[in-house]
Amino acid sequence: MMSSAFSPVYFTDENALGLGKLLRRSGRDDIVYPGHEDLPEVPLGARDVEWMQVAGARGFIVLTRDRRIRTRPAELAAYREFGVCSVWIGAKRDLRAQDQVELFLKHEDRIRRAAAQLGAGPWALVLGLSGLRQIALREG
């Protein structure tokens, strides 16, 4: 059973910047992204391995649309080294930022339960139109 005290903070990378900004504008204070004033150590344009170190250290759940981030050698090593926890938002077609928001909100309770169950990273989930599933972090 999930503790009601579990309250993750989400980090949207630049590939999901629109998602992060829309959620923040809707009044959410548990969302940060590159260039956000609450996260000065991650400016816009930060390399993946730079923000991954911050996200892992802070225990953020990364929301991304970058499907290759989990397979590129440097990023995969950073996932493991920094204990990154992420949710890849993917669908057969590219989703507009508002569609990403709706998909995230529809499944947020499931994401929170999965995150509480999985604990410290590294781990990765895929969120698609059909729901949420865990994936392996593996080479190529």
Image: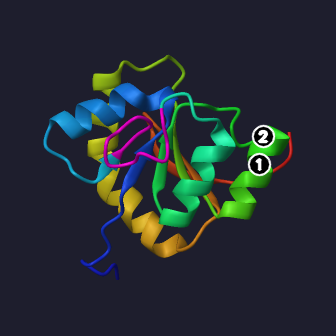
Mark 2 neighbour class, 10 Å CA radius: few under 14, some 14 to 19, many 20 or more: some
Where is 29 relative to 116, above or below? above
Which residue bears the numbered disc 2?
Answer: 71
First to last magenta residue range: 32-43
Does 121 sit left or right of 131 as displayed?
A: right
The CA span between labels 1 and 2 is 6 Å
Question: What is the chief secondary structure element of the magenta stretch?
Answer: loop
Q: Is residue 17 above or below residue 135?
A: above
Residue 73 drawn at (x, y percent): 84, 42
- The quadrant of the rendering that contains the N terminus is bottom left
Q: Quadrant of residue 12?
A: top left
* Secondary structure type for disc 1: helix
Earlier in the chain: of badge 1 and badge 2, it is 2
- On the image, which quarter does residue 3 sit in? bottom left
Whole-percent x, y for residue 124 in the image: 60, 53
The one nearer the camera, 66 or 57, is: 57
> Would residue 94 be found to the left or right of residue 111 on screen?
right
Q: In the image, what residue type sits under mark 1?
A: Leu
Q: Are marks 1 and 2 in contact (CB under 8 Å)?
A: yes
Q: Residue furthest left?
A: 27
Q: Residue at x 41, y 45 (%)?
A: 40
Find residue 123 and report its horizontal and vertical position in percent.
62, 60
Side (left or right) of 68 relative to 116: right
Q: Residue 96, percent across and down?
A: 36, 18
Number of labels in the image equals 2
Residue 119 is inside the magenta segment: no
Q: Residue at x 29, y 31 (%)?
A: 21
The residue positioned 40% from the left and 57% from the top of the image is 111
Residue under circle 1? Answer: 76
